Structures are given as structure tokens and as C-alpha cells.
Amino acid sequence: MAIQIEQFEVRIPLVHPFRTSFGVQKEKSAIIIKMTDDEGNVGWGESSLESVPGYCYETSGTAWLIQNEFLIPAFKGISEDTFPEIGDVHRVFAPIRGHEFAKTGLESAFWSLKASREGKSLGEMYGATKSKIPTGVSIGIQNRIEDLLQRISFFLDQGYKRIKIKIEPGWDYEVLKAVRKEYGDVPLMVDANSAYTLSDKDVEILKSLDRFDLMMIEQPLDYQDILMHKRLQAQISTPVCLDESIHTFNNALMAIEEDACRIINIKPGRVGGYYEAKRIAEALGKDKVWLGGMLETGIGRIHNLFIQAKEEFTIPGDTSGSDRYFKRDIITPHVLVDENGYIEVPRGEGLGFEVNEPLLKEYTVQHLSH
């Protein structure tokens, strides 16, 4: 079975700079994977990364290297004689330690290709049951509280069901106080991206946030840590949500069982793909998981829509409409949020959307075919 694999490294300008405790992001970097079988069926996937190692150690550069030297040869080795199953792909990638985002680009493209070959929706492959999903929005750190309040108003007017605010020391208590005063009981969560420690000063700040009735506080402590989060969770009533600390199925189960957190942010790229994302969601169940985002292009966004349409995902995720980040997304039509804050789950075979290949090539900075 001959399967052609193409890599496209893309750089797409963002509509608005996105600021977190890591820094300011002005463009989206990603590796788009296209798989084509010898019958002309096509699958698309994405390694949604940054060009610098801020969120994690992986970058678009490291993913490109690992895919070329290790993952693509491993995949080719099992697809020469027959069309593999998803378990086969997961198995041959497992000996390659880490590099979860690099794996996800290839794995997600394979899921999409398999759906096209079988004449199924990708949602059917993932076990989706919903026809539409509620969606939330993540808002970066702003220059002034007034600017933040205006951004929140804009997204609430568009129907978004949940607001997530990035925080860091000095941009936390007073910010949330102003938001609650202006917008009352709007569903609200915060994301610290590892900006705090267990120092007495930081713990007091995090304790003070309990008064704001937050859905959760995401990754307040070190990105590699689980134990310190357990100690923090024992001191605050707001549920801790872990993001950067969770890379495997076992990480997720241990964190929940040890009460290091009460909610897991599943990012398929961070856990090595949709095979593992499904396992985590199905094991933990409703109200314990939600789906975060990495400012994905339309291709990764569609994959995320389908996985969120599984019944386990009850908390609105970060899968916003395409226009939240891009003037021109690489899929047709763009992902749209309706006036009630929902995104319709695509129907039809495969992705349910078309990839705008001329625009993809316009954004491409390097391309390889295997």
C-alpha cells in the first residue's frame, strides 16, 4: 500500500497578538501533513507548534526533524504491504520517546485518511455523538484592565459560552475583581501557564482567587510538576486543572487519583494524538476533562471539533471560530461560531471541510514529499 506523505511548514499571521506569561505570539507556526493513498484518498493532520520552545520543548523545527528522520520512516515501514490500523501507528511511534506534537501531525492525518477510505466522517471514527458543541474563548494578557473588559464584551456578544483569562503575578486578583464586577456570573476560568510557585506570597494570591467562583485555575505551577499541584489543591477550593504537566494516559490518571488536580485539559498534540486523547477522556469521564487549544489552523481545529463532540466533553473548550485568530484560514468554509455560541460539527466524509491548497502553499515556508 503506497501512501504519499507531504509536510508543509506554515507561518500564518494572527489577527491579534496573543500574550501569555511565556511572551507575545504574532504568528501561528505549524506543520501540516497531507497523506494520499494509491486510490486517491486524502487525509490531513497538523502538528500545532510554536517556533520557539515556550509552551513545551518541541518547536516546528524539532518536529520537522523528528518526523523526517524517525516517524515517517517508521510509518512507511508498516504501510508498505497493507493499510495499517490506528493501533499499529501508535505502536510503532511508541519507542520514539516524547515528541508528542510531532507524532500528532502524522497520527491525525492517518485518522483523516482512514475516514476517507472508509467513507466515514472523522467524527464517527472518534466516537462523536453531538451535532454541535458549545465553545469558549481564551483571552491573552492585555495592556489595561479596560482593554480586557472590552475584549470580553466583544466575545460575549458573539455568543461564546465561557471566558478564559491568562494571568500572571500582578495581573490576577484586581483583574478578576473587575471582571466579576462588570460581568457577574459569566462562566470564568483562568490560565497561569506555570507563572506561580508555592511561595507564601503566591499561595496567598491563589487562595484569594477562591472568592471569584472560578470554574478552574489552569496550570498555576511548574510545567513538569504534579506533586506541588497536589499540595496547592489541598489549600484552595478552586479546582486545579493540569495542562502542561500531562503527557500520557498514566499522567492523567495519576493526577486525578492523587487529587493533584480535579480537571484535565486534554490537548491532543501534548498527549501524542487523538488515540491517547480518546483514552483519557473515556477513562476519566464527564466533568473531568475539557479540550484546550494551541491556536490551531483550520485543520487541527476540525480534528478538535470532532473529538469534543464525544459525550465526555461537557465543559466548553477553547475551539473558537477561525476568525478569532486568522483573516484567512486554510480550510473552506471557515469554522464559525453561531449567535448562540455553538459550532456545528461537520458532516460528510473525512474532515467535512475542504483544504484551500493554494492558500496553504502561500503560507508554506518549506515543503517535503515522501
Image (spheres, grey):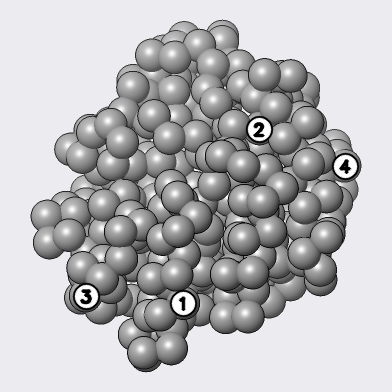
Q: Distance between the residues labelled 3 and 2?
A: 33 Å
State the residue in front, 299 or 184: 184
As helix, strand or loop, the secondary structure at mark 2 comes to loop
Q: Describe residue 347's horizontal placement relative to residue 102 as left or right.
A: right
Q: How far apart are marks 3 and 1 (CA)?
A: 15 Å
Which is in the foreground here, disc 4 or disc 3? 3
Q: How far apart are marks 2 and 4 (CA)?
A: 19 Å
As helix, strand or loop, the secondary structure at mark 1 comes to helix
Which callout, 2 or 1, points at the residue further toward the start of the chain?
2
State the residue in front, 232 or 59: 232
Label number found at residue 225? none
The residue singled out by tag 4 in the image is 327
The residue singled out by tag 3 in the image is 231
Residue kind at label 2, given as amino acid type: Tyr
Q: Where is residue 188 in the image (x, y as percent from the top left)?
A: 54, 47
Which callout, 4 or 3, points at the residue further toward the start of the chain?
3
Label number found at residue 205? 1
Q: Describe residue 370's horizontal placement relative to residue 252 as left or right.
A: right
Please rate how many residues cluster around mark 4, counting C-alpha atoms within 10 Å: few if below 14, some from 14 to 19, many from 20.
few
Q: Position of residue 65 (x, y in %)?
A: 52, 69
Residue kind at label 4, given as amino acid type: Lys
Residue kind at label 3, given as amino acid type: Arg
